[in-house]
Amino acid sequence: MGSYEKIESALIHAGYENDKQTGAVNVPIYQTSTYQQDGIGEMRGGWEYSRTGNPTRQALEKLIAELEKGTAGFAFGSGMAALTAVLSLFKTGDKILLSSNVYGGTFRVLDKVFNHFGITYSLEDMTDVEAFEKKLTPDVKAVLIESPANPLLTITDLAAVAAAAKRHGALTIVDNTFMSPYLQRPLELGADIVVHSATKYLGGHSDVVAGLAVVKDAKLAEQIAFIQNSTGGVLGPFDSFLLIRGIKTLAVRLDRHTENAQAIAEWLAENPEVSRVYYPGLTTHPGYDINARQAKNGGAMISFELTEKHDIRKFYKSLKLIALAESLGGVESLVCHPATMTHAAIPKETREKVGITDNLIRFSVGIEAKEDLIADLTQAIQNS
């Protein structure tokens, strides 16, 4: 760690020291696939082949490890590639428990890919930790949590669930995409592994697709490093550079994101045309107290439903400033329709059982002027 204490400084300085040869303050892009060796087994600085290791990617991996307070970080070509590498830790007969509302891609990779290898899963309500602990049977080898969960922003007591998992010999994996290490650090709360779709807040500009994983101990670091090198879904040097650049402004961006989100959530909650609002920064949100204890604030994701008289298709078409698009966490505001977009892979019956209705709107609040965002929402609601 450098000569700083706060994460705002770590975002800018962690993972890289100025280039000793040139003094470059930014990590160079080592756009190379291989490295010349001085002789058999004589590698310069240990560099051999860029699937195994690349200086630009290494700087990013050190950066995210320090930010999440982990032992080691690993960079992948997407969030799903990072999660797939983590899930590759498990074997036939192992079971993984998932948060009851979870990103559709996470559900899909377990339901359609890992099931071929005899790895099973179940969706569970983790808000009642005592009841949840009874589900930790001997075949359960991991608990995979999103908190806040996608898309209903359900809050899980990370410390309590991690402690329960540990009592039963299971790993705790937390998808920290919605919060980032600036707002929440699950490893400090007892989790074993943190994953990110770094495409989102960490990149922050909707211009790079990437995934990150951070582990708590050296044994897991060794295992994930082997999987990363063996399966090869690594992040390239230029995308690693873009992600480092994005992370440098994470604090100032998220301060604006969350300021906007709090104001808009309060406005939605008071709007008679809105029937329901999901946002962990509202005191009326279930889990508000837990989230306030384990995270800096409520984040910048909001989900809501309009009253029955509104046509949500017209709502989406009427938006002028806010874009209808997949993804989240960029500087621009985005909305999506979870039932047909991010969570389409989850069967309708399962979606509705956990509360992901066809009327649900998910809103990634950007850093535009909140007055302009509220004005756009107002006219879209009026025109729906």
Image: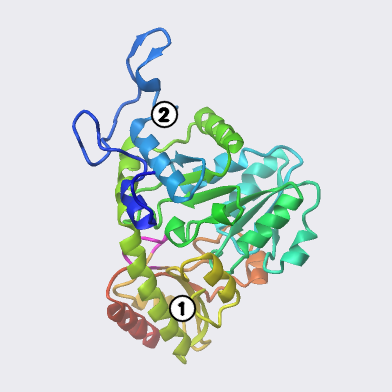
Question: Vertically, is 285 above or below 101?
Answer: below
Residue at image position (49%, 62%) is: 341
Q: How is the image coloured?
A: rainbow
Q: CA distance from mark 2 to mark 1?
A: 47 Å
Q: Main secondary structure of the magenta part?
A: loop
- The structure residue drawn at horizontal position 45% and vertical position 27%, both measured from the top left corner, is 52
For label 2, the SS is loop
Q: In the visual, does 137 lie left or right of 382?
A: right
> Horizontal and vertical percent for residue 139?
78, 46
383 sits left or right of 90 in the view: left
Q: Which quadrant is home to the N terminus?
A: top left
Tag 1 secondary structure: helix
Sequence-first tag of 2 and 1: 2
Q: Is residue 237 above or below residue 249?
A: above
Judge whether residue 33 can be spotted in this image: yes
Which of the 4 quarters of the picture holds residue 158?
Answer: bottom right
Identify the mark at residue 57; answer none if there is no mark.
none
| Mark 2 crowdedness (10 Å alpha carbons): few <14, some 14-19, many ≥20 | some
Question: Disc 1 marks which residue?
Answer: 312
Foreground residue among 214 and 4 = 4
Quadrant location of residue 164? bottom right
Stretch in magenta: 325-334
Amino acid carrying mark 2 in the image: Gly
Judged from this view, the residue extending furthest toward the top is: 39
Camera-nearest residue between 150 and 59: 59
Q: Position of residue 197 (x, y in %)?
A: 46, 51
Residue in the foreground of this view, choosing between 194 and 217: 217
Q: Amino acid at mark 1?
A: Ile
Q: Which residue is mark 2?
A: 53
Query: Among all residues in the image, which is located at the extreme left?
Result: 22
Image coordinates of residue 244 in percent, x first then y, are 33, 46
